[in-house]
């Protein structure tokens, strides 16, 4: 039994008119595209890895500042302050990450072998790593000024870098948010499709359509085509507006198409079990929360946990990151796309099965 193209086209045209008449989702879709694109370009495109550090040492500020400038390659930006009060004020007002307040006669005390205490002023949001690094830097500086060798012999380290060097080439926040912005667009279209399916099912429109020669399989094909076109089209527009298509466009297009298919399957499922707007939102959120985890996980450093890599949208997120931030192509991401395609089949099969049972005349 063949599927009639004219029947599918008629349902898609009808649903598209209903979508355009729904001012809420139409407004949210257009507004979302504009806001997400604007947010993307407003976010910083670079990462500032320098740590501003202040120094105060009465009578010898330049000596200590010159010693700390040896750490410039490690990201330290040293400024000299005339008084301890000015140094503390700069740290308190977040102008500096930390301040080194050396006591009066610090250099003379070191030369005479006398103990000296350096006050380390730390901003409240400074990490433990920054505190440890600055404390160690003060000790090394003290040994250097005193002309002594450190008390221990540090071993030689043969450094081997595996993977991309994110310390030298960190990923800006703008690039990290690409997958999340794409997911937000797909989420909006998923909610729109779920609302449309639920409204037609509860209102009896689907039953009236199936009384005609229209078959259930043709109805499912029309809903799938509409949902995929809307989701993929919106995501593609966002990708074009944010310059995402400049990175491996073939990979990006396929990833977005599979993402559109994925949310369409889940949209069919949410629309099949929902009865009204609130129930649709509930079921949609129940599905969307785990789907959003991979997009948020990229904002935090480290390797994602195995359970995150097992989520349906992980392949989409990883493909977008690989193509846009690491310059990778088909060879590196094909396995992510295959897993994503498998999840598309599962989501569509479940969504279509539930909807078929809900709308079948039998």
Image: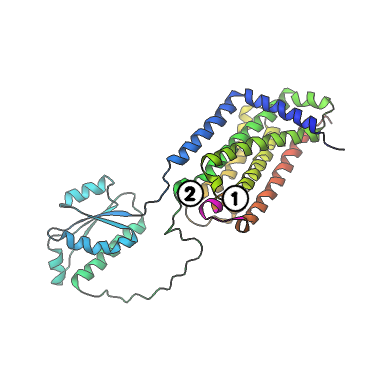
On the image, the x and y values in percent for residue 340 come to 65, 49
- Taking depth in this image into account, of 3 and 203 the one nearest to the observer is 3
The residue drawn where x is 62% and y is 27% is 277
Within 10 Å of disc 1 (Cα), the crowding (few <14, some 14-19, many 20+) is many
Q: Looking at the picture, tell me which residue is in the foreground, 198 or 282.
A: 198
Q: Is residue 250 above or below residue 67?
A: above
Rendered view: 143 above or below 298: below
Residue at x 70% of width, y 27% of height: 15
SS state under label 2: loop
Q: Which residue is mark 2?
A: 299
- Say few, some or many: other residues with alpha carbon within 10 Å of mark 2 (under 14 / 14 to 19 / 20 or more): some
User: Which residue shows up at 44% across the image and 49% down it?
Assistant: 172
Image height of 184 relative to 335, above or below: above
Q: Is residue 152 left or right of residue 322?
A: left
Is residue 166 a member of the stretch shown in magenta?
no
Q: Earlier in the sequence, mark 1 or mark 2?
A: 2
Q: Which residues are magenta?
A: 322-329
Instruction: Name the residue that disc number 1 marks.
Output: 314
- The quarter of the rendered structure image containing the C terminus is top right
Toward the right, the furthest residue is 1
Which image quarter: residue 99?
bottom left
Q: Nearer the viewer, residue 287 or 249?
A: 249
Label placed on residue 149: none
Give the number of marks: 2
């Amino acid at each position: 039994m063949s599927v009639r193209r004219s029947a599918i086209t008629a349902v898609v045209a009808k649903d598209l008119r209903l979508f355009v008449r729904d001012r809420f989702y139409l407004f949210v879709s257009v507004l979302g595209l504009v806001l997400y694109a604007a947010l993307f370009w407003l976010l910083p495109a670079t990462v500032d890895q320098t740590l501003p550090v202040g120094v105060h040492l009465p009578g010898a500020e330049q000596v200590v500042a010159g010693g700390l400038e040896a750490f410039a390659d490690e990201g330290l930006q040293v400024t000299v302050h005339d008084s301890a009060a000015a140094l503390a004020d700069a740290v308190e007002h977040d102008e500096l990450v930390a301040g080194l307040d050396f006591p009066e006669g610090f250099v003379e005390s070191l030369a005479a072998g006398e103990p000296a205490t350096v006050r380390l002023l730390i901003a409240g949001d400074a990490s433990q790593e920054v505190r440890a690094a600055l404390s160690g830097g003060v000790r090394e500086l003290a040994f250097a000024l005193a002309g002594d060798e450190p008390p221990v012999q540090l071993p030689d380290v043969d450094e081997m870098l595996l993977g991309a060097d994110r310390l030298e080439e960190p990923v800006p926040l703008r690039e990290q948010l690409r997958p999340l912005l794409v997911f937000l667009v797909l989420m909006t279209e998923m909610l729109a499709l779920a609302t449309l399916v639920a409204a037609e099912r509860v209102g009896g429109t689907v039953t009236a359509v199936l009384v005609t020669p229209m078959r259930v399989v043709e109805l499912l094909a029309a809903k799938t085509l509409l949902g995929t076109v809307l989701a993929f089209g919106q995501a593609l527009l966002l990708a074009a507006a944010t310059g995402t298509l400049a990175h491996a466009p073939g990979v990006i297009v396929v990833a977005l198409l599979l993402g559109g298919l994925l949310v369409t399957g889940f949209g069919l499922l949410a629309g099949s079990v929902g009865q009204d707007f609130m129930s649709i939102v509930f079921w949609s959120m129940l599905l969307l929360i785990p789907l959003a985890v991979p997009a948020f996980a990229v904002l935090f450093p480290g390797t994602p946990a195995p359970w995150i890599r097992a989520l349906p949208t992980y392949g989409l997120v990883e493909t977008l990151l690989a193509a846009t931030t690491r310059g990778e192509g088909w060879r590196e991401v094909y396995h992510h796309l295959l897993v994503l395609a498998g999840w598309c089949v599962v989501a569509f099969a479940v969504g279509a099965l539930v909807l078929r049972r809900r709308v079948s005349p039998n």
